[in-house]
Amino acid sequence: METDVAGIQETTSGPNISEIQRKQQFTGTVVKTTLAGALVDIGLDTPGVVHISQLQAEPVNRVEDVVQPGQQVDVWVQRVVPKKNRIELTMIKPLALEWRDIEKDMVLKGTVTRLEKFGAFVEIGAERPGLVHISEMTYGYIKDPSEVVKQGDEIEVKVLNVNRQKRQIKLSMKALEEPPIKEVKESKAPKKAEASVSEAEEPKEEPVPTAMEIALREAMERSKEKHPERQTEKERRKPTASNNELEQILARTLQHKVKTK
């Protein structure tokens, strides 16, 4: 919307008006004031116009309460209309970032303005601060944002998301950090080897004797008790007989018992 300032006449257009860029800063001199604003010479062929609403952020009742003719002021280009030889200025410092300028994945520098339990607000030059949630501060666990930053710290952040409708800016600090190296899990092969070693070290259980072996042993014990003189020292040292031999001895013992009966 074009701003009209009553009572201020503009001079003839100069060759440099097309070179003026939006948000460009100048130091100029107030040449005239009216009820609607002020005319400021910024060193070009075409003077700039400052509307009364652009003299300061707070409401202004009279232009003369803020500026006077001959006063030097800092101004920024708000709008340029070359066809009408018009340069609209503002004495309110413009935002470094407007909503249309903020994009996802942008890397910005900002200042921590406020800490909350859930995160930190960071001034990045936009209409309102962005939020770095506590989960986006670092890869490690933290209980409170004050463990990482404090108010007034200048930090670098990355834009995660911009919601222009809700005027929300989500930022991240850890997105600019190198992610921690994950520990390599131990292979399963050594564990199997360890298990094999453990199994080898475990004592093996002795086999349970059969009923025939038990009966044979009892028969041999009784035979030794009846005829101890028949057992020589060499026989005492002999190892236990095999199952086949034991079965043969048991069979002969049983036959002997039948004959004696």
Image (tube, rainbow, N blue to C red):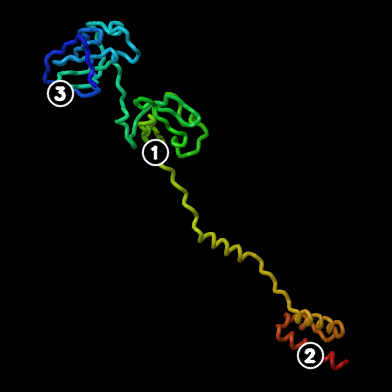
Q: Relative to 108, is 216 above or below? A: below
Instruction: Kindly identify the residue that appears in the image at 84 percent across and 90 percent down.
Output: 257
Classed neighbour count for the residue bearing mark 2: other residues with Cα under 10 Å, few (<14), some (14–19), many (≥20)? few
Q: What's the distance in space between the residues labelled 2 and 3, CA to CA? A: 129 Å
In the picture, the quarter occupied by the N terminus is top left
Q: Secondary structure at mark 1?
A: helix
Instruction: Kindly identify the residue that appears in the image at 23 percent across and 7 percent down.
Output: 34
The residue at which mark 3 appears reads as 18
Q: Quadrant of residue 194?
A: bottom right
Q: Amino acid at mark 3?
A: Ser
Tell which circle, 3 or 1, labels the residue nearer the N-terminal end.
Answer: 3
Instruction: Kindly identify the residue that appears in the image at 72 percent across and 83 percent down.
Output: 241
The residue at which mark 1 appears reads as 175
Could you say where residue 47 lies in the image, as x and y percent from the top left? 17, 14
Depth check, mark 3 against mark 1: the one in front is: 3
Front position in the image: 131 or 206: 131
Residue 252, disc: 2
Tell which circle, 2 or 1, labels the residue nearer the N-terminal end.
Answer: 1
Could you say where residue 202 lies in the image, as x and y percent from the top left? 64, 65
Quick check: 74 left or right of 249? Answer: left
Classed neighbour count for the residue bearing mark 3: other residues with Cα under 10 Å, few (<14), some (14–19), many (≥20)? few
Front position in the image: 223 or 196: 196
Could you say where residue 23 lies in the image, as x and y percent from the top left? 25, 23
Q: Amino acid at mark 2?
A: Arg
Q: Quadrant of residue 94?
A: top left
Q: Secondary structure at mark 3?
A: helix
Depth check, mark 2 against mark 3: the one in front is: 3
Q: Amino acid at mark 1?
A: Ala
Q: Secondary structure at mark 2?
A: helix
Tell which circle, 2 or 3, labels the residue nearer the N-terminal end.
Answer: 3
Q: What's the distance in space between the residues labelled 3 and 1, CA to CA? A: 41 Å
Instruction: Kindly identify the residue that appears in the image at 22 percent across and 18 percent down.
Output: 88
